[in-house]
């Protein structure tokens, strides 16, 4: 359904430190800067892109928005959460935990305030 998700950042190097650490914790590759100055992460067929807003205004986090990132295991979710908090992210909502449907979930805000979740697929 989606080709990519694009979020804004006011400090791409700070964002790179956070996202490089969290994607590496999930077994993903480090981000690459494209010729237009956007930081791009490709993982399991999906793309997350981070950029300074093209209108020149400051980047702000979406109120009510959450970006969900698939993880293959509980251990990956915990590693993602730990890497994020160690690289400028803030733990939010409940501590990492299993949900009634069997998925294991953790939440963070990145250094720019974007709300993220890493989660395993629910038990079938």
Image (spheres, grey):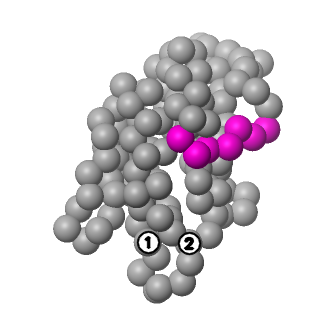
Q: CA distance from mark 1 to mark 2?
A: 7 Å
Q: Which residue in the rendered view is the most extreme toward the left?
A: 35
Q: Answer left or right for 67 relative to 11.
A: right
Residue at (47, 55) in percent of width and height: 14
Estimate the x, y position of residue 47 in percent, counting from the top left: 36, 49
Label 2: which secondary element: loop
Location of mark 2 (residue): 59
Of residues 100 and 69, the one nearer the viewer is 69
Q: Height in image: 44 above or below 111?
A: above
Q: What range of the chain is rendered magenta?
A: 87-93
Q: Mark 2 and mark 1 in contact (Cβ < 8 Å)?
A: yes
Residue at (47, 85) in percent of width and height: 56
Q: What is the quadrant of residue 78 in the picture?
A: top right
Location of mark 1 (residue): 52
Q: What is the quadrant of residue 57 in the picture?
A: bottom right
Estimate the x, y position of residue 110 in percent, counting from the top left: 59, 50
């Amino acid at each position: 359904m989606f080709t990519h998700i694009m979020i804004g950042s006011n400090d791409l190097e700070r964002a790179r430190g956070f996202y490089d650490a969290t994607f590496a914790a999930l077994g993903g590759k480090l981000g690459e800067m494209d010729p237009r100055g956007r930081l791009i992460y490709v993982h399991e067929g999906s793309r997350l892109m981070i950029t300074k807003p093209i209108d020149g205004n400051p980047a702000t986090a979406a109120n009510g928005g959450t970006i969900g990132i698939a993880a293959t295991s509980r251990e990956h979710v915990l590693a993602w959460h730990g890497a994020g908090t160690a690289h400028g992210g803030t733990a939010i909502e409940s501590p990492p935990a299993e949900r009634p449907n069997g998925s294991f979930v953790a939440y963070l805000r990145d250094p720019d305030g974007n709300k993220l979740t890493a989660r395993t697929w629910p038990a079938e």
